[in-house]
Image (cartoon, grey):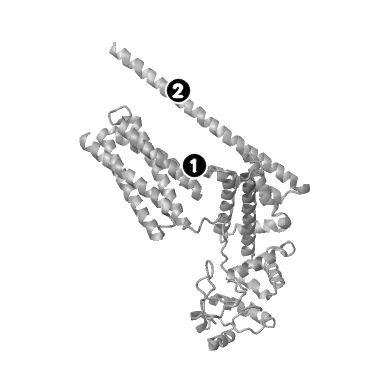
Amino acid sequence: KMAAAGGLRRAGWRLWRSRAVVRCQRYPPARALQASAVLRRASDELKKEPLTSSSQQHFDSPPAGHQPEQEPQGPHPSYTGQGGQESEDYESEEQLQHRILTAALEFVPEHGWTAEAIAEGAKTLGLSVAAAGMFHSDGSELILHFVSECNTKLSKLLEKEQKLVQLGEAQKKPIDEFLRDAVEARLRMLIPYIEKWPQALSVLLLPRNIPSSLNLLTSMIDDIWHYAGDQSTDFSWYTRRAVLTGIYNTTELVMMQDSSPGFEDTWRFLENRVADAMTMSNTASQVQSTGEAVVQGLMGAAVTVSNAETSRAVR
Amino acid sequence: VPGGGAALRLCSTRVAQEAINKPVIDRIIRVDHAGEYGANRIYAGQMAVLGRSSVGPVIQQMWNQEKHHLKKFNELMVAYRVRPTVLLPFWNVAGFVLGAGSALLGKKGAMACTVAVEESISEHYNNQIRTLIEEDPEKYKELLQVIKQFRDEEQEHHDIGLEHDAEA
Protein backbone atom coordinates (compact mmCIF):
# COMPACT_ATOMS: atom_id res chain seq x y z
CA LYS A 1 0.00 0.00 0.00
CA MET A 2 2.86 2.41 0.72
CA ALA A 3 4.30 1.65 -2.69
CA ALA A 4 0.97 2.52 -4.19
CA ALA A 5 0.94 5.79 -2.28
CA GLY A 6 4.31 6.69 -3.67
CA GLY A 7 3.09 5.82 -7.10
CA LEU A 8 0.16 8.12 -6.58
CA ARG A 9 2.31 11.11 -5.98
CA ARG A 10 4.31 10.30 -9.07
CA ALA A 11 1.12 10.06 -11.09
CA GLY A 12 0.30 13.61 -10.03
CA TRP A 13 -2.73 13.19 -7.84
CA ARG A 14 -3.90 16.48 -6.55
CA LEU A 15 -3.82 16.69 -2.77
CA TRP A 16 -6.30 19.29 -1.93
CA ARG A 17 -6.58 18.47 1.71
CA SER A 18 -3.61 19.91 3.47
CA ARG A 19 -4.70 19.07 6.94
CA ALA A 20 -6.37 15.81 7.81
CA VAL A 21 -6.24 12.90 5.48
CA VAL A 22 -9.32 12.33 3.41
CA ARG A 23 -10.31 8.74 2.92
CA CYS A 24 -11.79 8.06 -0.44
CA GLN A 25 -13.09 4.71 -1.45
CA ARG A 26 -13.03 5.76 -5.06
CA TYR A 27 -10.75 8.49 -6.33
CA PRO A 28 -12.10 9.07 -9.81
CA PRO A 29 -9.47 9.39 -12.51
CA ALA A 30 -11.28 12.46 -13.81
CA ARG A 31 -9.89 14.44 -10.95
CA ALA A 32 -6.32 13.79 -11.92
CA LEU A 33 -6.80 15.09 -15.44
CA GLN A 34 -8.44 18.25 -14.22
CA ALA A 35 -6.03 18.60 -11.41
CA SER A 36 -2.78 18.26 -13.30
CA ALA A 37 -2.96 21.82 -14.56
CA VAL A 38 -3.70 23.34 -11.18
CA LEU A 39 -1.48 20.96 -9.33
CA ARG A 40 1.60 22.92 -10.28
CA ARG A 41 0.03 26.00 -8.76
CA ALA A 42 -1.03 24.11 -5.70
CA SER A 43 2.06 22.01 -5.15
CA ASP A 44 3.80 24.65 -3.09
CA GLU A 45 0.81 24.78 -0.76
CA LEU A 46 0.79 21.08 -0.12
CA LYS A 47 1.87 19.69 3.15
CA LYS A 48 3.41 16.33 2.62
CA GLU A 49 0.85 13.84 3.87
CA PRO A 50 0.87 10.53 2.10
CA LEU A 51 -2.52 9.42 0.97
CA THR A 52 -2.82 6.26 2.97
CA SER A 53 -6.24 5.48 1.69
CA SER A 54 -6.63 1.89 0.79
CA SER A 55 -8.41 2.42 -2.48
CA GLN A 56 -7.51 -0.26 -4.92
CA GLN A 57 -8.35 -0.33 -8.59
CA HIS A 58 -8.09 3.32 -9.53
CA PHE A 59 -4.75 3.75 -7.92
CA ASP A 60 -3.10 0.90 -9.70
CA SER A 61 -3.26 2.29 -13.20
CA PRO A 62 -1.94 5.85 -13.58
CA PRO A 63 -4.69 7.77 -15.26
CA ALA A 64 -2.46 9.88 -17.53
CA GLY A 65 -4.16 9.96 -20.88
CA HIS A 66 -7.03 7.93 -19.53
CA GLN A 67 -10.38 9.29 -20.63
CA PRO A 68 -12.79 9.62 -17.81
CA GLU A 69 -15.96 8.03 -19.01
CA GLN A 70 -18.18 8.42 -16.08
CA GLU A 71 -18.80 11.32 -13.78
CA PRO A 72 -19.18 10.39 -10.18
CA GLN A 73 -22.86 10.59 -9.58
CA GLY A 74 -24.52 10.69 -6.23
CA PRO A 75 -22.85 10.43 -2.84
CA HIS A 76 -19.40 8.98 -2.41
CA PRO A 77 -19.23 6.59 0.49
CA SER A 78 -15.85 7.43 1.84
CA TYR A 79 -15.65 4.97 4.64
CA THR A 80 -13.48 2.13 3.50
CA GLY A 81 -13.71 -0.06 6.53
CA GLN A 82 -9.99 -0.70 6.64
CA GLY A 83 -9.18 -1.52 10.22
CA GLY A 84 -7.97 1.16 12.56
CA GLN A 85 -6.66 3.75 10.13
CA GLU A 86 -9.46 6.31 10.15
CA SER A 87 -8.66 9.66 11.69
CA GLU A 88 -11.01 11.39 14.08
CA ASP A 89 -12.01 14.31 11.84
CA TYR A 90 -13.22 12.05 9.06
CA GLU A 91 -15.36 13.89 6.55
CA SER A 92 -16.95 12.73 3.36
CA GLU A 93 -16.16 14.38 0.10
CA GLU A 94 -19.70 15.58 -0.20
CA GLN A 95 -19.59 17.22 3.22
CA LEU A 96 -16.37 18.93 2.28
CA GLN A 97 -17.89 20.23 -0.92
CA HIS A 98 -20.84 21.58 1.04
CA ARG A 99 -18.49 23.34 3.42
CA ILE A 100 -16.55 24.93 0.58
CA LEU A 101 -19.68 26.12 -1.17
CA THR A 102 -21.15 27.52 2.02
CA ALA A 103 -17.93 29.39 2.66
CA ALA A 104 -17.94 30.64 -0.93
CA LEU A 105 -21.31 32.32 -0.55
CA GLU A 106 -19.71 35.13 1.40
CA PHE A 107 -17.71 36.11 -1.69
CA VAL A 108 -20.57 35.97 -4.17
CA PRO A 109 -21.65 39.61 -3.84
CA GLU A 110 -18.13 40.59 -4.89
CA HIS A 111 -17.15 37.90 -7.38
CA GLY A 112 -20.51 36.63 -8.57
CA TRP A 113 -21.36 32.94 -8.88
CA THR A 114 -17.95 32.00 -10.17
CA ALA A 115 -14.95 29.84 -9.56
CA GLU A 116 -13.27 32.87 -7.97
CA ALA A 117 -15.87 32.95 -5.22
CA ILE A 118 -15.39 29.23 -4.65
CA ALA A 119 -11.63 29.64 -4.58
CA GLU A 120 -11.93 32.41 -2.01
CA GLY A 121 -14.25 30.24 0.03
CA ALA A 122 -11.80 27.38 -0.09
CA LYS A 123 -9.04 29.71 1.08
CA THR A 124 -10.99 30.73 4.17
CA LEU A 125 -11.22 27.05 5.10
CA GLY A 126 -7.47 26.72 4.80
CA LEU A 127 -7.68 24.73 1.59
CA SER A 128 -5.87 25.21 -1.67
CA VAL A 129 -7.61 27.34 -4.29
CA ALA A 130 -7.29 24.29 -6.51
CA ALA A 131 -10.34 23.05 -4.68
CA ALA A 132 -12.40 25.24 -7.00
CA GLY A 133 -11.45 22.81 -9.72
CA MET A 134 -13.88 20.32 -8.27
CA PHE A 135 -16.76 22.39 -9.54
CA HIS A 136 -18.07 23.69 -12.82
CA SER A 137 -16.70 27.04 -13.90
CA ASP A 138 -20.17 28.54 -14.34
CA GLY A 139 -20.94 28.23 -10.66
CA SER A 140 -23.78 25.75 -11.18
CA GLU A 141 -23.10 23.77 -8.07
CA LEU A 142 -22.68 26.92 -6.00
CA ILE A 143 -26.04 28.26 -7.11
CA LEU A 144 -27.84 24.95 -6.67
CA HIS A 145 -26.26 24.59 -3.25
CA PHE A 146 -27.49 28.05 -2.32
CA VAL A 147 -31.02 27.29 -3.50
CA SER A 148 -31.03 24.03 -1.60
CA GLU A 149 -29.83 25.76 1.55
CA CYS A 150 -32.51 28.45 1.24
CA ASN A 151 -35.19 25.82 0.78
CA THR A 152 -33.99 23.97 3.85
CA LYS A 153 -34.06 27.21 5.84
CA LEU A 154 -37.60 27.87 4.66
CA SER A 155 -38.74 24.37 5.63
CA LYS A 156 -37.26 24.75 9.09
CA LEU A 157 -38.94 28.13 9.49
CA LEU A 158 -42.33 26.80 8.40
CA GLU A 159 -41.96 23.77 10.64
CA LYS A 160 -41.15 26.00 13.61
CA GLU A 161 -44.20 28.14 12.92
CA GLN A 162 -46.35 25.04 12.63
CA LYS A 163 -45.13 23.82 16.02
CA LEU A 164 -46.03 27.17 17.57
CA VAL A 165 -49.54 26.90 16.17
CA GLN A 166 -49.85 23.33 17.39
CA LEU A 167 -48.76 24.37 20.87
CA GLY A 168 -51.38 27.09 20.78
CA GLU A 169 -48.79 29.84 21.05
CA ALA A 170 -49.64 31.35 17.68
CA GLN A 171 -52.69 31.90 15.55
CA LYS A 172 -53.21 29.82 12.47
CA LYS A 173 -52.88 32.15 9.51
CA PRO A 174 -55.48 32.28 6.74
CA ILE A 175 -54.23 30.67 3.54
CA ASP A 176 -53.53 33.84 1.58
CA GLU A 177 -51.54 35.36 4.41
CA PHE A 178 -49.64 32.12 4.93
CA LEU A 179 -48.67 31.82 1.27
CA ARG A 180 -47.71 35.47 1.11
CA ASP A 181 -45.49 35.24 4.17
CA ALA A 182 -43.83 32.03 3.04
CA VAL A 183 -42.99 33.37 -0.42
CA GLU A 184 -41.78 36.65 1.05
CA ALA A 185 -39.58 34.86 3.59
CA ARG A 186 -38.05 32.73 0.85
CA LEU A 187 -37.46 35.67 -1.49
CA ARG A 188 -35.91 37.78 1.26
CA MET A 189 -33.09 35.22 1.41
CA LEU A 190 -32.03 36.50 -2.00
CA ILE A 191 -31.54 40.07 -0.84
CA PRO A 192 -27.83 39.83 0.03
CA TYR A 193 -27.16 38.36 -3.43
CA ILE A 194 -29.71 40.31 -5.39
CA GLU A 195 -27.18 42.03 -7.65
CA LYS A 196 -25.85 38.75 -8.95
CA TRP A 197 -29.12 36.80 -8.85
CA PRO A 198 -30.13 37.40 -12.48
CA GLN A 199 -26.90 35.70 -13.48
CA ALA A 200 -27.79 32.80 -11.21
CA LEU A 201 -31.25 32.49 -12.73
CA SER A 202 -29.81 32.17 -16.21
CA VAL A 203 -27.41 29.46 -15.03
CA LEU A 204 -30.28 27.59 -13.40
CA LEU A 205 -32.02 27.55 -16.75
CA LEU A 206 -29.15 25.80 -18.51
CA PRO A 207 -30.39 22.46 -19.85
CA ARG A 208 -27.80 20.67 -17.74
CA ASN A 209 -29.18 22.21 -14.58
CA ILE A 210 -32.88 22.11 -15.35
CA PRO A 211 -33.60 18.74 -13.71
CA SER A 212 -31.98 19.82 -10.45
CA SER A 213 -33.38 23.33 -10.39
CA LEU A 214 -36.85 22.12 -11.30
CA ASN A 215 -36.69 19.49 -8.59
CA LEU A 216 -35.66 22.09 -6.01
CA LEU A 217 -38.42 24.46 -7.11
CA THR A 218 -41.18 21.85 -7.05
CA SER A 219 -40.20 20.46 -3.68
CA MET A 220 -40.09 23.98 -2.21
CA ILE A 221 -43.58 24.75 -3.53
CA ASP A 222 -44.84 21.40 -2.28
CA ASP A 223 -43.37 22.14 1.15
CA ILE A 224 -45.11 25.50 1.33
CA TRP A 225 -48.46 23.92 0.46
CA HIS A 226 -47.87 21.10 2.92
CA TYR A 227 -47.33 23.51 5.78
CA ALA A 228 -50.25 25.64 4.56
CA GLY A 229 -52.34 22.59 5.33
CA ASP A 230 -53.10 21.40 1.83
CA GLN A 231 -54.58 17.92 1.91
CA SER A 232 -55.96 17.67 -1.59
CA THR A 233 -55.86 14.28 -3.23
CA ASP A 234 -57.48 15.22 -6.49
CA PHE A 235 -56.43 17.32 -9.45
CA SER A 236 -56.43 20.49 -7.40
CA TRP A 237 -53.14 19.16 -5.97
CA TYR A 238 -51.64 20.11 -9.32
CA THR A 239 -53.51 23.36 -9.91
CA ARG A 240 -52.56 24.72 -6.50
CA ARG A 241 -48.90 23.99 -7.03
CA ALA A 242 -48.95 25.35 -10.55
CA VAL A 243 -50.56 28.57 -9.38
CA LEU A 244 -48.13 29.04 -6.50
CA THR A 245 -45.16 28.31 -8.77
CA GLY A 246 -46.42 31.02 -11.10
CA ILE A 247 -46.78 33.45 -8.22
CA TYR A 248 -43.30 32.67 -6.93
CA ASN A 249 -41.57 32.97 -10.30
CA THR A 250 -43.25 36.20 -11.33
CA THR A 251 -42.61 37.79 -7.94
CA GLU A 252 -38.97 36.75 -8.15
CA LEU A 253 -38.64 38.45 -11.53
CA VAL A 254 -40.35 41.60 -10.26
CA MET A 255 -37.92 41.61 -7.35
CA MET A 256 -34.96 41.62 -9.74
CA GLN A 257 -36.11 44.94 -11.16
CA ASP A 258 -37.44 46.46 -7.99
CA SER A 259 -35.62 49.51 -6.66
CA SER A 260 -38.21 50.64 -4.13
CA PRO A 261 -37.16 50.94 -0.49
CA GLY A 262 -37.30 47.59 1.25
CA PHE A 263 -38.69 46.01 -1.91
CA GLU A 264 -42.16 47.23 -0.97
CA ASP A 265 -43.27 47.18 -4.62
CA THR A 266 -42.43 43.49 -4.78
CA TRP A 267 -44.38 42.63 -1.64
CA ARG A 268 -47.36 44.59 -2.92
CA PHE A 269 -47.15 42.72 -6.22
CA LEU A 270 -47.03 39.45 -4.29
CA GLU A 271 -50.08 40.40 -2.23
CA ASN A 272 -52.04 41.18 -5.39
CA ARG A 273 -51.07 37.93 -7.09
CA VAL A 274 -52.06 35.86 -4.08
CA ALA A 275 -55.36 37.72 -3.87
CA ASP A 276 -55.93 37.02 -7.58
CA ALA A 277 -55.32 33.34 -6.96
CA MET A 278 -57.84 33.26 -4.13
CA THR A 279 -60.42 35.03 -6.29
CA MET A 280 -59.73 32.62 -9.12
CA SER A 281 -60.28 29.61 -6.92
CA ASN A 282 -63.49 31.06 -5.53
CA THR A 283 -64.70 31.82 -9.01
CA ALA A 284 -63.76 28.32 -10.12
CA SER A 285 -65.79 26.68 -7.37
CA GLN A 286 -68.70 29.00 -8.09
CA VAL A 287 -68.56 28.09 -11.75
CA GLN A 288 -68.51 24.44 -10.83
CA SER A 289 -71.56 24.62 -8.58
CA THR A 290 -73.41 26.73 -11.14
CA GLY A 291 -72.51 24.19 -13.77
CA GLU A 292 -73.78 21.34 -11.63
CA ALA A 293 -77.05 23.20 -10.98
CA VAL A 294 -77.50 23.83 -14.69
CA VAL A 295 -76.91 20.16 -15.50
CA GLN A 296 -79.44 19.09 -12.92
CA GLY A 297 -81.93 21.56 -14.33
CA LEU A 298 -81.45 20.19 -17.82
CA MET A 299 -81.83 16.60 -16.62
CA GLY A 300 -85.06 17.52 -14.87
CA ALA A 301 -86.34 19.22 -17.97
CA ALA A 302 -85.46 16.18 -20.09
CA VAL A 303 -87.26 13.83 -17.71
CA THR A 304 -90.32 16.08 -17.70
CA VAL A 305 -90.42 16.23 -21.47
CA SER A 306 -90.01 12.48 -21.84
CA ASN A 307 -92.76 11.87 -19.29
CA ALA A 308 -95.02 14.26 -21.17
CA GLU A 309 -94.28 12.46 -24.44
CA THR A 310 -94.95 9.06 -22.86
CA SER A 311 -98.26 10.13 -21.35
CA ARG A 312 -99.30 11.70 -24.69
CA ALA A 313 -98.37 8.53 -26.54
CA VAL A 314 -100.37 6.44 -24.09
CA ARG A 315 -103.52 8.58 -24.49
CA VAL B 1 -9.70 24.08 -17.37
CA PRO B 2 -11.41 21.77 -15.03
CA GLY B 3 -14.91 21.24 -16.17
CA GLY B 4 -15.76 17.75 -15.04
CA GLY B 5 -17.09 18.98 -11.77
CA ALA B 6 -18.04 16.94 -8.82
CA ALA B 7 -21.40 15.33 -8.47
CA LEU B 8 -23.09 17.22 -5.72
CA ARG B 9 -26.12 15.53 -4.37
CA LEU B 10 -28.65 18.27 -3.93
CA CYS B 11 -31.18 17.12 -1.46
CA SER B 12 -34.73 18.27 -1.83
CA THR B 13 -36.36 19.92 1.11
CA ARG B 14 -38.59 16.98 1.94
CA VAL B 15 -38.58 15.97 5.56
CA ALA B 16 -37.18 12.48 6.05
CA GLN B 17 -39.90 10.03 6.91
CA GLU B 18 -38.44 7.31 9.06
CA ALA B 19 -36.11 6.14 6.29
CA ILE B 20 -38.79 4.43 4.21
CA ASN B 21 -38.18 3.55 0.61
CA LYS B 22 -40.00 6.65 -0.60
CA PRO B 23 -40.09 5.96 -4.35
CA VAL B 24 -41.57 2.49 -3.86
CA ILE B 25 -44.15 3.60 -1.31
CA ASP B 26 -45.01 6.64 -3.41
CA ARG B 27 -45.72 4.52 -6.44
CA ILE B 28 -47.72 1.96 -4.48
CA ILE B 29 -49.96 4.55 -2.86
CA ARG B 30 -50.40 6.55 -6.04
CA VAL B 31 -51.37 3.54 -8.12
CA ASP B 32 -53.70 2.14 -5.47
CA HIS B 33 -55.36 5.51 -5.03
CA ALA B 34 -55.88 5.77 -8.77
CA GLY B 35 -57.23 2.23 -8.85
CA GLU B 36 -59.76 2.79 -6.08
CA TYR B 37 -60.76 6.08 -7.65
CA GLY B 38 -61.34 4.34 -10.96
CA ALA B 39 -63.26 1.51 -9.28
CA ASN B 40 -65.48 4.10 -7.62
CA ARG B 41 -66.28 5.64 -10.97
CA ILE B 42 -66.96 2.23 -12.52
CA TYR B 43 -69.54 1.40 -9.87
CA ALA B 44 -71.01 4.89 -10.20
CA GLY B 45 -71.48 4.26 -13.92
CA GLN B 46 -73.05 0.87 -13.26
CA MET B 47 -75.42 2.35 -10.67
CA ALA B 48 -76.45 5.11 -13.07
CA VAL B 49 -77.79 2.44 -15.43
CA LEU B 50 -78.74 -0.48 -13.22
CA GLY B 51 -79.43 1.40 -9.99
CA ARG B 52 -83.13 0.63 -10.06
CA SER B 53 -82.81 -2.96 -11.20
CA SER B 54 -82.64 -6.08 -9.05
CA VAL B 55 -78.85 -5.99 -8.83
CA GLY B 56 -78.93 -2.38 -7.73
CA PRO B 57 -78.52 -3.08 -4.00
CA VAL B 58 -75.62 -5.48 -4.66
CA ILE B 59 -73.76 -2.95 -6.75
CA GLN B 60 -74.51 -0.24 -4.21
CA GLN B 61 -73.02 -2.32 -1.42
CA MET B 62 -69.84 -3.03 -3.38
CA TRP B 63 -69.65 0.64 -4.27
CA ASN B 64 -69.85 1.62 -0.60
CA GLN B 65 -66.89 -0.62 0.18
CA GLU B 66 -64.91 0.98 -2.65
CA LYS B 67 -65.75 4.41 -1.25
CA HIS B 68 -64.29 3.28 2.05
CA HIS B 69 -61.15 2.06 0.27
CA LEU B 70 -60.76 5.39 -1.50
CA LYS B 71 -61.13 7.26 1.76
CA LYS B 72 -58.37 5.17 3.31
CA PHE B 73 -56.01 5.85 0.45
CA ASN B 74 -56.78 9.55 0.61
CA GLU B 75 -55.62 9.45 4.22
CA LEU B 76 -52.47 7.48 3.38
CA MET B 77 -51.73 9.86 0.55
CA VAL B 78 -51.75 12.83 2.90
CA ALA B 79 -49.78 10.98 5.59
CA TYR B 80 -47.00 9.94 3.22
CA ARG B 81 -47.14 13.18 1.18
CA VAL B 82 -47.65 11.35 -2.07
CA ARG B 83 -48.84 13.20 -5.12
CA PRO B 84 -51.97 11.91 -6.84
CA THR B 85 -51.74 10.67 -10.40
CA VAL B 86 -52.01 13.35 -13.02
CA LEU B 87 -54.41 11.10 -14.97
CA LEU B 88 -57.23 11.46 -12.43
CA PRO B 89 -59.55 13.40 -14.75
CA PHE B 90 -59.05 10.69 -17.35
CA TRP B 91 -59.86 7.87 -14.91
CA ASN B 92 -62.89 9.87 -13.83
CA VAL B 93 -64.41 9.73 -17.28
CA ALA B 94 -63.00 6.38 -18.39
CA GLY B 95 -64.19 4.61 -15.25
CA PHE B 96 -67.71 5.97 -15.52
CA VAL B 97 -67.91 5.12 -19.21
CA LEU B 98 -66.68 1.58 -18.57
CA GLY B 99 -69.21 1.07 -15.78
CA ALA B 100 -72.13 2.56 -17.66
CA GLY B 101 -71.15 0.84 -20.88
CA SER B 102 -70.91 -2.60 -19.32
CA ALA B 103 -74.21 -2.01 -17.48
CA LEU B 104 -75.94 -1.10 -20.74
CA LEU B 105 -75.06 -4.62 -21.89
CA GLY B 106 -77.28 -5.85 -19.11
CA LYS B 107 -76.81 -7.29 -15.66
CA LYS B 108 -74.59 -10.04 -16.98
CA GLY B 109 -72.40 -7.46 -18.67
CA ALA B 110 -72.06 -5.42 -15.51
CA MET B 111 -71.18 -8.46 -13.43
CA ALA B 112 -68.68 -9.70 -16.00
CA CYS B 113 -67.01 -6.30 -15.91
CA THR B 114 -66.88 -6.44 -12.12
CA VAL B 115 -65.34 -9.91 -12.18
CA ALA B 116 -62.64 -8.91 -14.66
CA VAL B 117 -61.75 -5.68 -12.86
CA GLU B 118 -61.69 -7.22 -9.39
CA GLU B 119 -59.57 -10.12 -10.61
CA SER B 120 -56.86 -7.83 -11.95
CA ILE B 121 -57.05 -5.62 -8.86
CA SER B 122 -56.55 -8.61 -6.58
CA GLU B 123 -53.57 -9.76 -8.59
CA HIS B 124 -52.15 -6.27 -8.46
CA TYR B 125 -52.55 -6.07 -4.69
CA ASN B 126 -50.88 -9.43 -4.34
CA ASN B 127 -47.88 -8.16 -6.26
CA GLN B 128 -47.64 -5.15 -3.99
CA ILE B 129 -47.86 -7.34 -0.90
CA ARG B 130 -44.99 -9.40 -2.26
CA THR B 131 -42.94 -6.28 -2.94
CA LEU B 132 -43.49 -4.88 0.53
CA ILE B 133 -42.70 -8.17 2.22
CA GLU B 134 -39.49 -8.39 0.21
CA GLU B 135 -38.58 -4.86 1.30
CA ASP B 136 -39.27 -5.02 5.01
CA PRO B 137 -42.43 -6.54 6.50
CA GLU B 138 -41.85 -4.90 9.85
CA LYS B 139 -41.36 -1.37 8.61
CA TYR B 140 -44.41 -1.49 6.38
CA LYS B 141 -46.63 -3.46 8.72
CA GLU B 142 -49.53 -1.00 8.71
CA LEU B 143 -49.52 -0.55 4.97
CA LEU B 144 -49.34 -4.31 4.47
CA GLN B 145 -52.34 -4.80 6.73
CA VAL B 146 -54.38 -2.28 4.79
CA ILE B 147 -53.50 -3.77 1.42
CA LYS B 148 -54.16 -7.32 2.60
CA GLN B 149 -57.56 -6.37 3.92
CA PHE B 150 -58.48 -4.54 0.73
CA ARG B 151 -57.27 -7.45 -1.36
CA ASP B 152 -59.59 -9.75 0.56
CA GLU B 153 -62.52 -7.40 0.02
CA GLU B 154 -61.81 -7.06 -3.67
CA GLN B 155 -61.70 -10.85 -3.85
CA GLU B 156 -65.16 -10.86 -2.24
CA HIS B 157 -66.45 -8.52 -4.92
CA HIS B 158 -64.99 -10.83 -7.51
CA ASP B 159 -66.85 -13.78 -6.01
CA ILE B 160 -70.10 -11.82 -5.74
CA GLY B 161 -69.73 -10.85 -9.38
CA LEU B 162 -69.26 -14.49 -10.34
CA GLU B 163 -72.35 -15.49 -8.35
CA HIS B 164 -74.55 -12.96 -10.07
CA ASP B 165 -72.93 -13.41 -13.41
CA ALA B 166 -73.87 -17.07 -13.31
CA GLU B 167 -77.48 -16.52 -12.37
CA ALA B 168 -78.34 -13.21 -14.09
The residue shown at (50%, 73%) is: A69
Seen in the picture, residue B161 relative to A262 is either above or below; the reply is above
Disc 2: which residue: A297
Q: Residue furthest left?
A: B167
Where residue A143 sits, quadrant-wise, is bottom right
Amino acid type at mark 1: Phe
Q: Residue furthest top?
A: A315
Q: Nearer the viewer, residue A212 or B14?
A: B14
Q: Residue furthest right?
A: A261
Q: Where's residue A256, x and y in %?
A: 70, 51
Horizontal arrangement in the rendering, residue B80 relative to residue A101 (left or right): left
Quadrant of the image for the C terminus of chain B? top left
Labels in figure, total: 2
Amino acid type at mark 2: Gly
Secondary structure of the residue carrying numbered label 2? helix
Q: Nearer the viewer, residue B34 or B76?
A: B76
Disc 1: which residue: A235
Seen in the picture, residue B92 relative to A157 is either above or below; the reply is above
Work out whether mark 1 precedes mark 2 in sequence or the reverse, and give the earlier one: 1
Residue A135 visible (yes or no) = no
Q: Where's residue B72, x and y in %?
A: 43, 43
- Determine the CA span between mark 1 and mark 2: 26 Å
The residue shown at (39%, 45%) is: B35
Horizontal arrangement in the rendering, residue B162 relative to residue A80 (left or right): left
Q: Where's residue A22, x and y in %?
A: 59, 76
Q: Where's residue A280, x and y in %?
A: 59, 36
The residue shown at (44%, 52%) is: B27
Secondary structure of the residue carrying numbered label 1? loop
Quadrant of the image for the N terminus of chain B? bottom right
